[in-house]
Image (cartoon, rainbow, N blue to C red):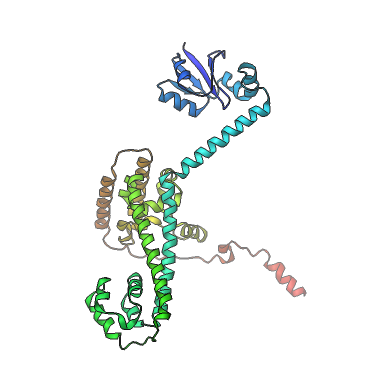
């Protein structure tokens, strides 16, 4: 047999010859159906069915214009009722169709929720939230403890180190060299802190008043350590989810790009010009509204080769990185080979060439700006005369 037709539904899977005569009826595409196919080619109207048949080594073609399959799609209930006997009443058929659709939707939602790139996108948001909380708590701890020992707050710039010292020894008079050195404070700062322990401008507080401050410092340290653990988890996960993208951008920037787009697939399907300005949408819309200069980079500014470059070459380097990011994301999406290190090396070489070619900033260009009045803000003066006439009339 040269040709067979196949149409599927939650009620039955029907196998026909090329003129539409039924050959066999099955519950699904199983081994029994596959063994009953003896044609050189099978034509079907369902993508999932074609994938299953291709995996079994069967030559399949999707043809939505086939007259017999089109007739089955238009009158599926009547044809199933008259030819298969699997359904008798339409409500029964409707319940089976609805139940199958709900089951497929639940399966797809579950599969999407379990994707690693989706999890990474959410973890990045969690890291940002924790970072905001850590910053707010750090500022508040510095403000509170400066009432007791302002000199140490000024000397120790790292608030997490300050929180560890406060948690261990909150009382100013009990602070010694051993406590400070165990928290990584250098010798010159230790001498300054010890110098002010007996001659501080801060007020004296009893231990009872310092206990809540210790608890506050403990919660700050816990949030900071949680954030660091999540960052380490993102770094480990990105090397598995998107190794090429991680090699080109670094784990943090790669994860933020995936988070901004929602998934690795969405990132891979974007153009390089879009990826270049992801994260700078506000500046872009402002430039479009005021006819100013559009941004040259967004999230990718955090890549060292871009962020550490002179401002007059950042646009060129950002465009090169955006192009490589698209390639890397698509390779990772379709499980291609690892070439991330080579792409990053090529980008470093390109950066060096651009810096050597443009060592100095270009001379500033004098721009003549024309005043457009209210029209620049999207307003017109068409009602101005009418309003003045109303005022004169009054």
Report the side of 349 relative to 384 (left or right).
left
Q: How many marks?
A: 0
Q: Is residue 392 above or below residue 316?
A: below
Residue 272 in percent (x, y) is at 40, 47
The residue depicted at 51 percent of the width and 24 percent of the height is 28
Instruction: Tell which of 51 and 170 is nearer to you.
Output: 170
- Residue 155, located in which quarter of the rendered image? bottom left
Where the C terminus falls, by quadrant?
Answer: bottom right
Q: Is residue 75 above or below residue 246?
A: above
Quick check: can you spot residue 266?
Answer: yes
Residue 58 in percent (x, y) is at 42, 20
Instruction: Tell which of 290 and 84 is nearer to you.
Output: 84
Q: In this view, does 346 lie above or below 376?
A: above
The residue depicted at 35 percent of the width and 42 percent of the height is 332
Quick check: can you spot residue 279?
Answer: no
Instruction: Tell which of 176 and 292 is nearer to you.
Output: 176
The residue depicted at 39 percent of the width and 69 percent of the height is 218
Report the side of 272 relative to 69 (left or right).
left
Residue found at the very far right of the displayed protein: 393
Residue found at the very far left of the displayed protein: 187
Residue 201 in percent (x, y) is at 36, 87
Residue 87 in percent (x, y) is at 64, 23
- Residue 339, located in which quarter of the rendered image? top left
Residue found at the very far top of the displayed protein: 1
């Amino acid at each position: 047999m040269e040709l067979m037709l196949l149409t599927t539904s939650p009620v039955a899977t029907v196998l026909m010859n090329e003129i539409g005569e039924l050959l066999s009826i099955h519950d699904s595409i199983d081994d029994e159906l596959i063994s009953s196919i003896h044609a050189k080619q099978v034509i079907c109207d369902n993508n999932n069915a074609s994938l299953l048949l291709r995996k079994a080594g069967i030559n399949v073609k999707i043809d939505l214009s086939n007259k017999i399959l089109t007739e089955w799609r238009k009158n599926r209930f009547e044809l199933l009722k008259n030819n298969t006997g699997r359904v008798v009443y339409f409500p029964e058929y409707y319940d089976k169709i609805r139940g199958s659709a709900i089951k497929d939707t639940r399966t797809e939602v579950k599969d999407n929720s379990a994707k690693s790139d989706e999890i990474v996108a959410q973890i990045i948001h969690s890291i940002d939230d924790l970072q905001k909380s850590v910053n707010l708590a750090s500022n508040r701890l510095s403000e509170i403890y400066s009432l007791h020992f302002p000199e140490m707050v000024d000397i120790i710039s790292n608030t997490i180190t300050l929180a560890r010292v406060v948690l261990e020894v909150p009382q100013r008079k009990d602070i010694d060299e051993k406590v400070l050195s165990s928290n990584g404070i250098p010798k010159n700062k230790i001498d300054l802190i010890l110098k002010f322990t007996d001659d501080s401008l801060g007020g004296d507080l009893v231990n009872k008043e310092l206990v809540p401050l210790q608890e506050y410092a403990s919660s700050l340290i816990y949030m900071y350590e949680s954030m660091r653990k999540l960052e380490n988890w993102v770094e480990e996960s990105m090397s598995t989810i998107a190794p090429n993208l991680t090699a080109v951008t670094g784990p943090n920037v790669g994860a933020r790009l995936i988070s901004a787009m929602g998934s690795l697939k969405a990132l891979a399907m974007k153009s390089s010009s879009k990826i270049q300005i992801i994260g700078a949408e506000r500046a872009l819309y402002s430039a479009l509204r005021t006819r100013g200069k559009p941004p040259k980079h967004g999230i990718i500014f955090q890549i060292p080769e871009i962020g550490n470059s002179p401002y007059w070459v950042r646009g060129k380097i950002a465009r090169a990185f955006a192009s490589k990011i698209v390639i890397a994301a698509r390779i990772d999406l379709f499980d291609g080979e690892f070439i991330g290190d080579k792409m990053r090396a090529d980008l470093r070489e390109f950066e060096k060439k651009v810096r050597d070619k443009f060592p100095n900033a270009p001379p500033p260009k004098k721009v003549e700006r024309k005043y457009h009045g209210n029209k620049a803000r999207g307003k017109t003066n068409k009602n101005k005369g009418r309003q003045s006439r109303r005022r004169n009339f009054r």
